[in-house]
Image (cartoon, rainbow, N blue to C red):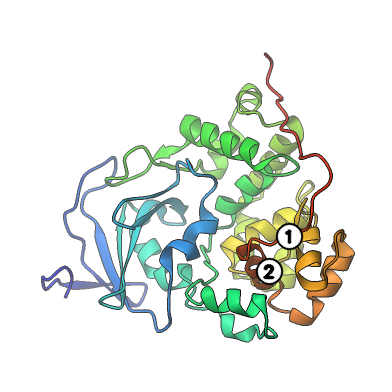
């Protein structure tokens, strides 16, 4: 039963998915495809998907008053819009999707919402971190299966403030993105690899992206098919594949694989604040470097990134004495 009505189901990649229903309208859309999925574990949909948002005004991500999360993605089957809504009273997650990529998105809904994740594998000693872990029992590591979707914004976030990176992402998607199918309003799907490669230098400049980062994006999109293969690789192989591209270091690879692969062990080495935060939470150190952070996290393999997320969720941070990183502006005035 879907929405109180009996609907014929169609097979999508070997799974049964309810047949499309007419819902809303939009460019390249038609009817919505629908899936209802019952997770076998506590699930906080909003907090699980939140790391996929690139800023509060991300054109590819939005939430609505009913608690639904909307995402616009470019899948191997084409562009698609996915709407995910938890219905706790029924114990199910309801998903609607539009566009050519709708079957691909619905087929991978459990994987997106952390069905393959194993948070129980991380056992923490009694204390604030264990309490934070219990409080986040419904938070899983999302896995999109889409590398480029997370890689490009991660490159834009290299060595700049998050505000700068979010502004660049918004500007580029609004200028070069594809309107999201379905009743998605002003949402945009990120450009394809080919479309990224055709962004003129002056538009990168206008968006506040310096030549070093834009050149890294250009190198990455030329290798998009090879990089997308990393979504099916293990931890070591996926890092090796991404970091083989000049300009993509460990931090960028980790920020990408945390989202595309749901990699619970991908530590953002090179982060401006993370070493001090982890050092303070695990050892009471005011100052820590990457090597010290990794040493503290080593006993928690293969859940080092998961532990970092728990630490950050507590709101704990080391005392700060230096000036904050000042935003750059690479645009002419």
Residue 223 image position (x, y, % from top left): 66, 50
Q: CA distance from mark 1 to mark 2?
A: 8 Å
Of residues 276 and 157, the one nearer the viewer is 276
Identify the image quadrant of residue 37: bottom left
171 vs 212, left or right, is left
Residue 130 image position (x, y, % from top left): 63, 80
Q: Residue at x 64, y 72 (%)?
A: 306
Identify the image quadrant of residue 271: bottom right
Q: Circle 1 is placed at which residue position?
A: 268
Mark 1 element type: loop
Q: Residue at x 63, y 66 (%)?
A: 314
Q: Circle 2 is placed at which residue position?
A: 305
Residue 156 image position (x, y, % from top left): 66, 41
The quadrant of the rendering that contains the C terminus is top right
Mark 2 element type: helix
Q: Residue at x 49, y 29 (%)?
A: 175
Identify the image quadrant of residue 82: bottom left
Residue 317 image position (x, y, % from top left): 73, 59
319 vs 119, left or right, is right
Q: Residue at x 54, y 45 (%)?
A: 55
151 vs 35, left or right, is right
């Amino acid at each position: 039963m879907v929405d109180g009505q009996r609907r014929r189901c169609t097979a999508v990649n070997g799974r049964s998915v309810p047949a499309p229903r007419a819902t809303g309208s939009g460019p390249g859309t038609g009817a919505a495809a629908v899936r209802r999925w019952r997770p076998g574990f506590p699930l906080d949909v909003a907090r699980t998907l939140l790391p996929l948002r690139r800023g509060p005004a991300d054109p590819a991500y939005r939430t609505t008053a009913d608690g639904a999360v909307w995402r616009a993605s470019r899948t191997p089957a084409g562009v698609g819009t996915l709407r995910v809504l938890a219905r706790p009273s029924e114990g199910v997650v309801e998903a609607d999707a539009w566009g050519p990529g709708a079957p691909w998105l619905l087929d991978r809904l459990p994987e997106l919402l952390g069905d393959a994740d194993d948070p129980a594998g991380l056992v923490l000693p009694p204390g604030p971190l264990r309490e934070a872990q219990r409080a986040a029992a419904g938070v899983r590591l999302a896995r999109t299966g889409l590398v480029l979707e997370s890689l490009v914004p991660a490159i834009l976030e290299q060595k700049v403030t998050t505000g700068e990176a979010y502004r660049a992402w918004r500007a580029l998607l609004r200028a070069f993105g594809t309107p999201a199918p379905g009743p998605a309003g002003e949402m945009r799907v990120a450009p394809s690899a080919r479309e990224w490669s055709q962004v003129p230098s002056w538009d990168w400049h206008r968006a506040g992206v310096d030549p070093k980062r834009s050149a890294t994006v250009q190198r990455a999109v030329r290798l998009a098919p090879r990089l997308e293969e990393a979504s099916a690789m293990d931890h070591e192989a996926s890092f090796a594949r991404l970091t083989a591209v000049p300009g993509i270091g460990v931090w960028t690879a980790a920020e990408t694989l945390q989202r595309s692969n749901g990699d619970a062990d991908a530590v953002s080495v090179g982060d401006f604040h993370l070493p001090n935060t982890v050092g303070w939470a695990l050892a009471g150190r005011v100052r820590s470097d990457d090597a010290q952070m990794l040493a503290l996290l080593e006993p928690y393999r293969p859940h080092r990134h998961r532990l970092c997320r728990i630490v950050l969720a507590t709101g704990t941070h080391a005392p700060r004495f230096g000036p904050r990183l000042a935003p750059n502006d690479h645009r002419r005035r």
